[in-house]
Amino acid sequence: MSDHVVFENLVDMFLKSVERYRTRRLFGVKSGGAYHWLTYGEVGEQVKRFRGGLSSLGVKQGDRVAIIANNRVEWAVSAYATYSLGAQFVPMYEAQQPKDWQYILKDCGAKVLLAANQYLVELYEFRTEAELIGHTDFDLLPRRLAEKFRRDDLQIMERRKPVTKIVEIFLNRQGIPSWFITSKYPILSKTNQVLGVMGIIQDYHQRRELFSGQQSMARVMNHLHAQFREKLSIRQLAEMGGISLRQFERRFQNHFNLTPQQYLIKLRIQESCDLLMSPNLKIGEIAIDLGFYDQSSFTLQFKKQMGLTPLQYRKQYL
């Protein structure tokens, strides 16, 4: 009897191969001088989850999904997930110029753009993405901050609705903060079961560059970053930008998803993390130096942003 198998298309070939060779090795990822292998079954499960994520973003037959990445397992996973939805896959490489990406994206009208990013790997001082995979927020962040992220994720899964443009903080292993804009989406299966949460992060301070083509607003941002320790008037910042207070606040909110006052507080909190590493500086002195009314006000804002008090932060990272 012939063992010949007929495939209708690439997706059919992949699905039948996963079913037939579930325990066999498919992809090997080199890390630390050795290869770590993924089986057909493991890759098939990744494709299933990724397909659910794309579907939750509204990707359907005829849409285009673009990717900017070098050769990697995720490339194959995203390709098969895209094809299985009847969508078209638009590949681009990290070696290409940004102008090439812009042209291709504009020409193809992609609904979703996928991009590889080593930033979190470097932030948490891993050598490869493979080493990062499997770690949770509780492995990488202070417990109170990890608990907050966990509550947010569970809430998204429970409500089955995305939450976009959240301003969140990530700490590296030395406790140095970096701010990101995060959008989170529930991953749903074809039977509408919640499989998990997928997130997209963007370096928060890169948003500042959006004002680079507006000289007056760029001047305001430079002044804000240089004088954030001082008592700053939002109205005076608006006047410096040559626009009304209402226009300034609206434009600021649109760019950063924060009010100017909230942005100012985040700058001060970020600087305080560095100052708290100096054991000779008293917390009260840091508070006054950074423009807070007193130590109580500083502690309140610090805990709100960081999930722990300045003293707890100092004991954990000093």
Image: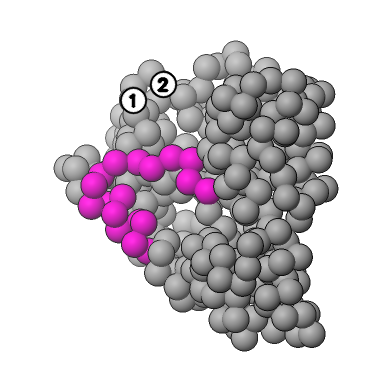
Identify whether 83 is placed above or below 134. above
Residue 126 at x, y = what percent?
A: 66, 69
Is residue 154 highlighted in magenta?
yes
Q: Nearer the viewer, residue 222 or 22?
A: 222
Residue 318 at x, y = what percent?
A: 70, 84
The Cα atoms of the two marked residues, 2 and 1, are separated by: 6 Å
- How packed is label 1: few (under 14 Cα within 10 Å), some, or many (20 or more)? some
Residue 274 at x, y = what percent?
A: 74, 69
- How packed is label 2: few (under 14 Cα within 10 Å), some, or many (20 or more)? some
Q: Secondary structure at mark 1?
A: loop
Name the residue rendered at 52%, 17% in the picture.
109
Q: Amino acid at mark 1?
A: Lys
Q: Which residues are magenta?
A: 150-167
Q: Amino acid at mark 2?
A: Asp
Residue 297 at x, y = what percent?
A: 56, 65
Identify whether 143 is placed above or below 67. below
Q: Which mark is residue 256?
A: none
Q: Nearer the viewer, residue 106 or 62?
A: 106
In the displayed structure, does residue 252 sit left or right of residue 168?
A: right
In the displayed structure, does residue 107 sit left or right of residue 25?
A: right
Q: Which mark is residue 63?
A: 2
Q: Does residue 299 appear anywhere in the picture? A: no
Identify whether 140 is placed above or below 41. below
- In contact (CB < 8 Å): disc 2 and disc 1: yes
Is residue 208 highlighted in magenta?
no
- The residue carrying mark 1 is 60
Q: Quadrant of residue 209?
A: top right
In the displayed structure, does residue 255 sit left or right of residue 232?
A: left
Name the residue rendered at 76%, 85% in the picture.
279
Q: Does residue 232 appear anywhere in the picture? A: yes
Name the residue rendered at 72%, 45% in the picture.
232
